[in-house]
Amino acid sequence: MIRVLIVDDEALIRSGIELILNAAPDIEVVGAVTGARAVAEAERLQPDIVLLDIRMPDVDGLTVLDRMLSKPSPPVVAMLTTFDNDEYVTAALHRGAAGFLLKDTSPDHLALQVRTLAAHGVALSPRVTSTVVNGYLASTRREPADTVLIDTLTDRERAVLVHLADGLSNADIAARLYLGVGTVKDHVSAILAKLQVANRVQAALLAERGGLLDKGEQR
């Protein structure tokens, strides 16, 4: 079972997401709380995934994100937002958020995205991808250092990174490249270290900014 903690200031949102996810046979919502209780409940419940509202009146979602990711063995944290152009999303990218989901995501897609996060894939709602992420990339000048970091990757690591940037999980990448899942996991760890990034989302963005995805790499 994938254990999920929902953090949102609105009880109706918490209840709706909980109802949707608990209907999935492989997902269990272990808690649904406001931002003020989020860090303590995450430590107590040890969820695999935290769905965290990016804007809350009692405590800022970015502050909660920082506190959660500073803990030993932190959960995977994906941000919830009602806005596909929320300026907080860019800040959350830099701070290590593993995904972004709009609150009006369809029930089937929400469960699918939670599974993607649990499988160490990149979970981004399509509208977030097309607006916020593309806008973030367009506003960020391509740095020579990005290309230098990408040049440290082996050919196999580049291939893994391209598939990672497509949002594929380790298992999916392994199937595409005819590798073992453990081998892919080792490649991903090496990629994150060489690119000096905290997670797969940041690696995907650096690959885009560094031009790797513009070169027609074999997918």
Image (cartoon, helix red, strand yellow):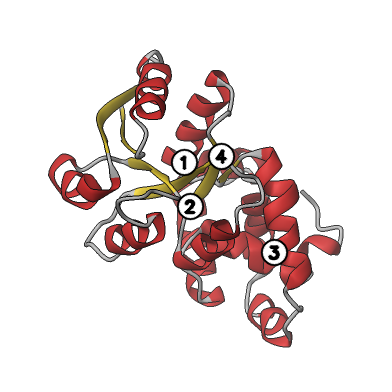
> Residue 128 appears at what percent x and percent y?
66, 46
- State which quadrant residue 32 falls in: top left
Q: Residue at x 39, y 13 (%)?
A: 23
> Residue 5 appears at what percent x and percent y?
30, 37
Q: Are marks 3 and 2 in contact (CB under 8 Å)?
A: no
Q: Are marks 1 and 2 in contact (CB under 8 Å)?
A: yes
Q: Residue at x 34, y 62 (%)?
A: 63
Distance of label 3 from label 4 (alpha carbons): 18 Å
Task: Check disc 1 and report its element: helix, strand or loop.
Answer: helix
- State which quadrant residue 146 falls in: bottom right
Mark 1 or 3, which is nearer the eye? 3
Position of 9 relative to 61 (above/below): above
Residue 117: which disc? 1
Name, please, the residue furthest toward the left: 44
According to the picture, the residue beneath numbered tag 3 turns out to be 136
According to the picture, the residue beneath numbered tag 4 turns out to be 82
Nearer-N-terminus badge (3/2): 2
Name, please, the residue furthest toward the front: 57
Task: Check disc 3 and report its element: helix, strand or loop.
Answer: helix
Mark 3 or 2, which is nearer the eye? 3
Task: Check disc 2 and report its element: helix, strand or loop.
Answer: loop
Q: Are marks 4 and 2 in contact (CB under 8 Å)?
A: no
Nearer-N-terminus badge (1/2): 2
According to the picture, the residue beneath numbered tag 2 turns out to be 98
